Image: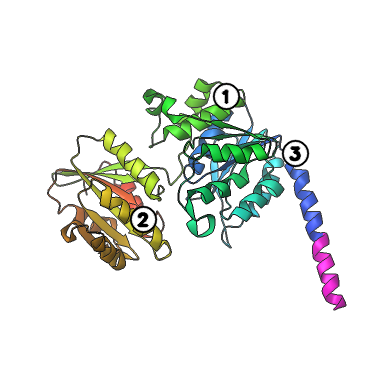
Amino acid sequence: MYSLVIGLLILIIIWIIEYHNHQYWRNKIPMIIHVNGTRGKSSVTRLLAAGLRAGGKKVMAKTTGSAPVIIFEDGSETPIVRHFGANIKEQLKIIKFCAKRDIDILVLECMAVTPEYQWVTEKKMVRSQIGVITNTRLDHLDVMGPGLRNCTLSLCNSLPQNGVAFTAEWKMFPLMEKEAGKLHTKLNFSDGSKVPDEFMRGFTHIEHKDNVALSLDVCEYCNVDRNAALQEMYKAIPDIGAAEIFEVKRGDKKIFFVHSFAANDPESTEFLINYVKQIHSYVDNVSVVLNTREDRIYRSKQLIDMCVDLDHDELFLVGQQTQSMFSYALSRNIPKNKVHDCGWVSGTELIDAVSKMNAKEILLFGVGNIGGNGGIIVDYFRERNGKNV
């Protein structure tokens, strides 16, 4: 019994020492910007780091998206290797590492999912001065739901105390503003519709106006000229999960493959599909490749439901759960001749299946998730972009 009590006391003492050590390193960083939200966190983190550098700030950033990285003061980056999976304690190590480099600003993407961990990360670890919530969507409902209201409240756990915050979320803005008010934090709305089309042409990947509006507003708040910030954002390395368009040819067919795996909730996916369809309005055939995963069955069903209402030609199922999703697609009255169970495929096998369609030009959207078969397909198109296959 005594040994148990002594062991517990030792653990408490160690925790207290670790906590105070962390606060020492945290206090050496003048400003931390904590970026949260359902979609676009990694993109906004990268845009902010680039834009703030335009103001002569010594900025570092850390993303937690498709491939976590540390972004250094000069814009170069290095991947974060995780030997034991993702853990929010990683943020402690990042803060200490960055504090030792005597930086001005750290832009930190939130890596917590559950409401409790989001609260602990912000209130006990990060203690940001500026909070960013990109948007709120129906995602991670098993831990953040049910419903959009609960997802929003969960994300609000990352808002700073006595600080300032920015969001491009308009549907749930009143609720978010109310939650920010409880923390004595001013919440600002960033309107993506006010970003001119010509601003978007400088990006080499598909970027969203909401992300750019958010990033420019935060840079302006930090006294960085908007135009100078934008010019640096053009140079930022896009996240590996950023949407891109690759073009390949097979005989007399031209296939535009849209890497949109990162936008894996129905609302974001449908928005991206409609956005790209506007850019390539001359392409008549619009088809979908859904990457299915064993641990994402609910999400796959959501995206099939989206396809029911989406004006598309054919649906190609790839990955781990193609048979069950094929049956589900038929139960949702998608015509059998428009659904293809491809199983786990190589890029060449996918092209073989897609090329059977009677269309000269095809706009092919990869949706679902980049993990597993999705990554293989993206690598295939990226390596062969602009080539005959």
* Residue span colored magenta: 1-13
Q: How far apart are marks 2 and 1 (CA)?
A: 38 Å
Q: Name the residue under label 3.
A: 28
Height in image: 220 above or below 4? above
Categorize mark 3 by other alpha carbons within 10 Å: few (<14), some (14-19), many (20+): some
Height in image: 253 above or below 375? above
Task: Examine the structure image and report whether residue 8 is included in the region drawn in magenta.
Answer: yes
**Residue at the extreme right:** 2
Q: Residue at x 39, y 28 (%)?
A: 200
Q: SS class of the residue under badge 3?
A: loop
Left or right relative to 295: residue 352: left
- Badge 1 amino acid: Glu
- Badge 3 amino acid: Lys
Q: Which of 5 and 199 is in front in this view?
A: 5
Q: Which residue is drawn at 17% across and 52% down?
A: 355
Q: Which of marks 3 and 1 is nearer the N terminus?
A: 3
Helix, strand or loop: magenta stretch: helix
- Quarter holding the N terminus is bottom right
Categorize mark 2 by other alpha carbons within 10 Å: few (<14), some (14-19), many (20+): some
Q: Which of 29 and 72 is in front in this view?
A: 29
Q: How far apart are marks 2 and 3 (CA)?
A: 45 Å
Q: Which colour scheme is used?
A: rainbow
Q: Mark 2 points at which residue?
A: 302
Q: Residue at x 30, y 60 (%)?
A: 318
Q: SS class of the residue under badge 1?
A: helix
